[in-house]
Image: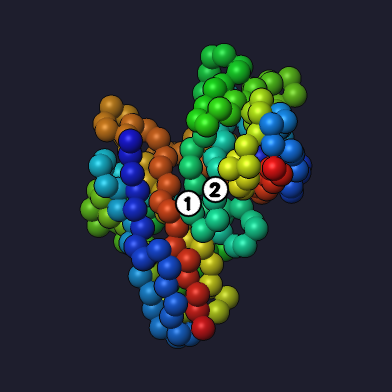
């Protein structure tokens, strides 16, 4: 069965420092992996995705993620955090099924960036 | 880019009444729409998947008679919470998916969510 794990409930980082939000996955076949961000009382905003190709994926707002097949990880990174990056981040895996696909979300990691 | 809207953005209703939430794909045709429920500080839980013109497929544990889903057109899906109770209070998020080769493509786009409070 496909699953996504985000081991950290919360990540704290100082503004200007690099940030990493961890994600590991379990999926049969080739994974389709995603990162989304959610601000309070808002829907999900797409950040980036990995389908195939380069292991380092660049996305919106300066975020990037590295796909590591051997470690089954897809950690989200940013070289220099901003206070405005404070939000809830979800890792997700897409599972193909009959007639389409289903997206499974991790539990989410709350990122706090302190000025 | 592809935009999904939800209406209302928030609603308060009394226990025992029904409330309808609309989800619209504004600039693409969505053959498939998804409804999620999110409890405070928790992840999104898929409630059901609906395909235009056919019955929705509900996830295990979701009462289909309580959460009525109608996907009557390629741009509109509705979720009706019937006989709402306080435990139905939650944040409901819809998502729409287009088709390959069409505007929006075979991707999933999320609405801004609807906060339902049942008193």
Q: In this view of the protein, which residue sits in the foreground, A55 or A21?
A: A21
- How far across and how far down the image is residue A23, in percent? 69, 35
Number of marks in picture: 2
Quarter where residue B3 is shown: top left
Badge 2 and badge 1 both on one subunit:
yes
- How far across and how far down the image is residue A98, in percent? 44, 39
Task: Indicate left or right for A56 with B36 as reference.
Answer: right
Quarter where residue B12 is shown: bottom left
Residue B60 tag number: none
Task: Indicate left or right for A29 with B111 as reference.
Answer: right
Q: Tell me the crowding category of disc 1: few under 14, some 14 to 19, or many 20 or more residues within 10 angstroms, Cα based.
A: many
Q: Who's the residue at 25% across and 42% down the image?
A: B27
Q: Which chain carries label 2?
A: A
Residue B24 in view here: yes
The answer to whether the residue labelled 2 contacts the one labelled 1, judged by CB atoms less than 8 Å apart, is: yes
- How far across and how far down the image is residue B56, in percent? 38, 56
Q: In which quarter of the image is the N terminus of chain B?
A: top left
Mark-to-mark CA distance, 2 and 1? 6 Å
Q: What element carries label 2?
A: strand
Q: Is mark 1 on a helix, strand or loop?
A: loop
Q: Tell me the crowding category of disc 2: few under 14, some 14 to 19, or many 20 or more residues within 10 angstroms, Cα based.
A: some
Q: Who's the residue at 39% across and 78% down the image?
A: B18
Q: Which of marks 2 and 1 is nearer the N terminus?
A: 2
Residue A43 tag number: 1
């Amino acid at each position: 069965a496909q699953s996504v794990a985000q081991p950290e409930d919360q990540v704290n980082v100082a503004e200007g420092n690099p940030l990493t939000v961890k994600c590991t996955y379990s999926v049969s076949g080739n994974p389709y992996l995603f990162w989304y961000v959610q601000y309070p009382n808002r829907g999900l905003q797409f950040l980036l995705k990995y389908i195939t190709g380069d292991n380092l994926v660049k996305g919106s707002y300066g975020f990037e993620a590295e796909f590591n097949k051997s470690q089954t990880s897809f950690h989200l990174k940013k070289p220099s955090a901003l206070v405005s990056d404070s939000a809830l981040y979800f890792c997700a895996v897409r599972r193909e099924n009959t007639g389409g696909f289903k997206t499974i979300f991790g539990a989410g990691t709350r990122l706090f960036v302190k000025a | 880019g592809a935009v999904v809207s939800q209406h209302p953005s928030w609603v308060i209703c009394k226990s025992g009444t029904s409330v309808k939430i609309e989800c619209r794909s504004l600039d693409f045709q969505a053959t498939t729409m998804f409804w999620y429920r999110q409890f405070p500080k928790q992840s999104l839980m898929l409630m059901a998947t609906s395909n235009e013109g056919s019955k929705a497929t509900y996830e295990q544990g979701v009462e289909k008679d309580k959460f009525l889903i109608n996907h009557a057109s390629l741009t509109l899906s509705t979720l009706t919470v019937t006989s709402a109770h306080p435990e139905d209070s939650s944040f409901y998020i819809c998502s729409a998916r287009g088709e390959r080769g069409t505007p929006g493509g075979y991707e999933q786009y999320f609405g801004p969510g609807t906060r339902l409070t049942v008193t």
